[in-house]
Amino acid sequence: TMGQAMGRSINSVFARLASKNLTRDKLLGMANRLGWGQDLPFDVKVAQSSISLPDDDVGFARTAAGFWNTTLSPFQGANLATTIANGGEMIRLSLVASVKDEAGEIYRGPTARQVVRRALEPAIATQVTSMMEQTVDNGTSYKSFHDRNGKSYLPDIRIAGKTGTLTKPVADGPFYTWWVGFAPSNKPEVALSILVANRGKWRVKATNVASDM
């Protein structure tokens, strides 16, 4: 199923589905709605996440599955997790509530929930959440969130997540692992975006850091 493919990071499934069912305009349109190629409102300027779709069919499929031709910042990862956790509404994130110096308050962040736009329909966000839950229940994050006997470290909390692995073609370059998600997935309170870079053999994966947090 798509849920199993998501949970186990079988990217070839999504590459094939994208090649069969998506057009470049549809994929770019959704990427833009989710924040790619745009300045997202925040307390400080954040680098844009980018996407570039090649003309050939294989390149398009690989890009759609997340293999290449895109960039993603940890901020954008948090923005994605928060958007799905809020039923498809993109919410303005903030860094601090206020900043003060010896003279008093010099900056005040937003005090109310601000909706940037609706990026996904609620039903789609619910389906994506269900697929992300499989990452923790039986996918690539299973060992991080369960002991050797299969007992959950967080038995009373449903968790939605997605792992990622990325390496740049540079000699002795860092080995990157990702984890993006939120919990409790049925009534979200916390969203996480974790990027870990290890040189040589990995010492800790982002999924392990997510479990600890």
Image (tube, helix red, strand yellow):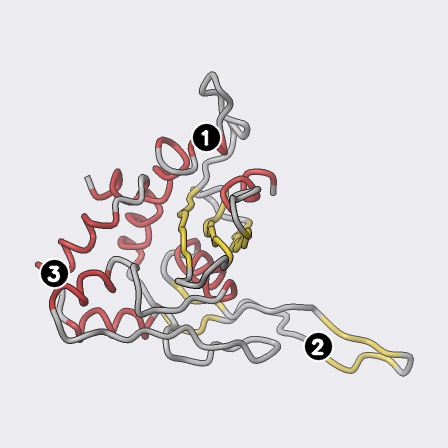
Which residue is rendered at x = 27% and y = 54% of the image?
Answer: 124
| CB atoms of marks 2 and 1 within 8 Å | no
Classify residue 112 by image quadrant: bottom right
Local crowd size for mark 2, using a 10 Å CA cut-off: few (<14), some (14–19), many (≥20): few
Query: Does dot 3 land on a helix, a strand or a loop?
Result: helix
Residue wearing tag 3: 19
| CB atoms of marks 3 and 1 within 8 Å | no
Residue wearing tag 2: 108
Image quadrant in which the C terminus is located: top right
User: Which residue is more in the foreground, 186 or 152?
Assistant: 152
Rendered image: mark on residue 78: none
Query: Does dot 1 land on a helix, a strand or a loop?
Result: helix
- Horizontal side of residue 154 vs 150, given as left or right: right
Q: What separation in Å lies between label 3 and label 1 (alpha carbons)?
A: 32 Å
Dot 3 or dot 1, earlier in sequence:
3
Q: Position of residue 200 (x, y in %)?
A: 52, 49
* Circle 2: residue type: Arg
Rendered image: mark on residue 143: 1
Q: What separation in Å lies between label 2 and label 1 (alpha carbons)?
A: 42 Å
* Residue farthest to the left, as pictured: 20
* Circle 3: residue type: Ser
Query: Does dot 2 land on a helix, a strand or a loop?
Result: strand
Dot 2 or dot 3, earlier in sequence:
3
Q: Position of residue 153 (x, y in %)?
A: 54, 27
* Circle 1: residue type: Lys
Which residue is rendered at x = 53% and y = 52% of the image?
Answer: 192
| CB atoms of marks 2 and 3 within 8 Å | no
Q: Position of residue 129 (x, y in %)?
A: 35, 47
Classify residue 132 by image quadrant: top left
Dot 2 or dot 1, earlier in sequence:
2
